[in-house]
Amino acid sequence: MTIDTIRQDFPLLQKKANDQLVYFDSAATALKPLQVINAMNEYYFDYPANPGRGEYDLVHRAATAVEASRAKVAKFLSAKPEEIVFTSGTTMGINLVADAFVRKHLQRGDEIIIAESEHAANVLPWYSLQERYGIVVKIVSLDMNQRLTVDILKHHVSLKTKFLAFSDVSNVLGTKTDSKSIVSFAHQHGLYVLIDAAQSAPHFPIDVVELDVDFLVFSGHKMCGPTGIGVLYAKYDLLEKMDPYLMGGGMSLKYAKDFSIRFAPIPHRFEAGTQPVAEIIGLGAAIDYLMSIGFDFIHQQEMVLRNRAIKGLQAIPFVKIYNPNAEAGIITFNLEGVFSQDAATHYNAHHIAIRSGQHCVRNLIDYLQTDGTLRWSCYFYNTEVEVDAFIEATKKGMDFLDAFFR
Ligand SMILES: Cc1ncc(COP(=O)(O)O)c(C=O)c1O
């Protein structure tokens, strides 16, 4: 397996019109391989039916494909298929847990802990519980190594703390949390734990049994899958304690005019309405694809690229790097004195796609002591030649920006 052969799987990278494009924004969304696009097209061309709504062959084929994807996700996480709930993405997964579980099991005055590095998706659902139900949100700082640790939590967990939500990999700092130790510590104190795995599921193997985590969420589109599909994993006994979130077709077995409802078995109870069938099938194909590449290869390639990019950036005097020691292929940096959006415009002029701004993590502004940053993020399909193009464009950054913006 070589990067050249891998790149042939990605139509965007094969288009003549894109031969100058350098895509370093995979933390925002990953590129999609043919294997995923073809699996989705096959559904639309050959069996575009509504699973669970009919008794004809096309319906059975669609339903079988959905459950096959569920089984793939379960195997991917070492979970059971009935513990996998399809959502529209990480954001919906966290909202679902907040509204259907936490709201029900926590009282006014109980505390939820989150880290200051959490994405808005793992902040605002908890703020909303505070606002609506008086559940108290505590935001804890990271340590000097840019991590949430057991030591930090020891200072903040009280008898009122009932829930902890944190990201396995930060989408700004790229640091990998020691999630297993944190879950174990949290359980010793009786807390439920949710892990936001949006930035780890695409890059690191996850074993929910080994982690012993209660809830874990991620999105398909950051791992070569389609948009509009994500996963909530929850321990089965916690799903049993959870209220249905969306009400509608497919989530009840029976209801009557006396307002009684008998809910469908778990996990379908949490999947009301017609599912994003093509996206579910695409997610299954994305998992097959990533497994065929292998996480060892993925991580190794990302580290080669990251190290090369860090070395190149460190040699440029006007570059400030905020996360020199991260485990994921994410570099957060600035061209000193330059507004990050202006710098991103410069990269765009060189056909280099990188992210700028706050990356949906506003609570990290004080920690980083800046209003915005540039974020370079790679995946296994990127090359060292692309890294060199990025470094060359960075070197030219100040001339361009002096001329146009300062
Ligand atoms: C760490 C983290 N959590 C949550 C999200 C939200 O994911 P989505 O927009 O797919 O729901 C993201 C997306 O950037 C993320 O990086």
Image (cartoon, rainbow, N blue to C red):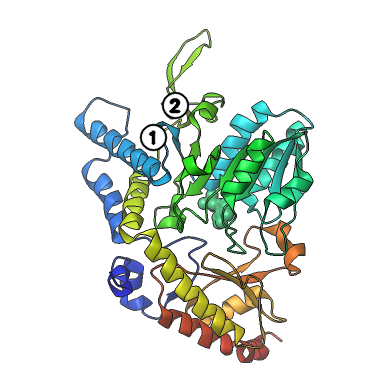
The local crowd at label 1, few if under 14, some if 14 to 19, many if 20 or more residues have their Cα within 10 Å, is many
Which residue is at a point 30% across and 34% down the rendered structure image? 63
As drawn, 150 above or below 341: above
Q: Nearer the viewer, residue 251 or 135?
A: 135
Q: Residue furthest top?
A: 258
Q: Is residue 156 left or right of residue 149?
A: right
Q: Residue flagged by tag 1: what amino acid is it?
A: Pro
Is residue 49 in sight in this rendering?
A: no
Task: Tell me the quarter of the image containing the N terminus.
Answer: bottom left
Is residue 237 in sight in this rendering?
A: yes
Label 2: element kind: loop
Q: Which mark is residue 81?
A: 1
- The image position of residue 90, as x and y in percent, is 53, 47
Could you give the CA–CA distance between mark 2 and mark 1, rounded to whole angstroms? 10 Å
**Looking at mark 1, is its residue's CB closer than 8 Å to ligand 1?**
no
Q: Residue flagged by tag 2: what amino acid is it?
A: Ile
Q: Is residue 252 left or right of residue 4?
A: right
- The image position of residue 313, as x and y in percent, is 58, 82
- The image position of residue 225, as x and y in percent, is 39, 54
User: Along the polypeptide, which appears first: circle 2 or circle 1?
Assistant: 1
As drawn, 116 above or below 266: below
The local crowd at label 2, few if under 14, some if 14 to 19, many if 20 or more residues have their Cα within 10 Å, is some
- Residue 94 found in image quarter: top right
Which residue is at a point 41% across and 42% down the rendered structure image? 78
Marks counted in the figure total 2
As drawn, 406 above or below 214: below
**Looking at mark 2, is its residue's CB closer than 8 Å to ligand 1?**
no
Name the residue that disc number 2 marks. 266
Q: Which mark is residue 71?
A: none
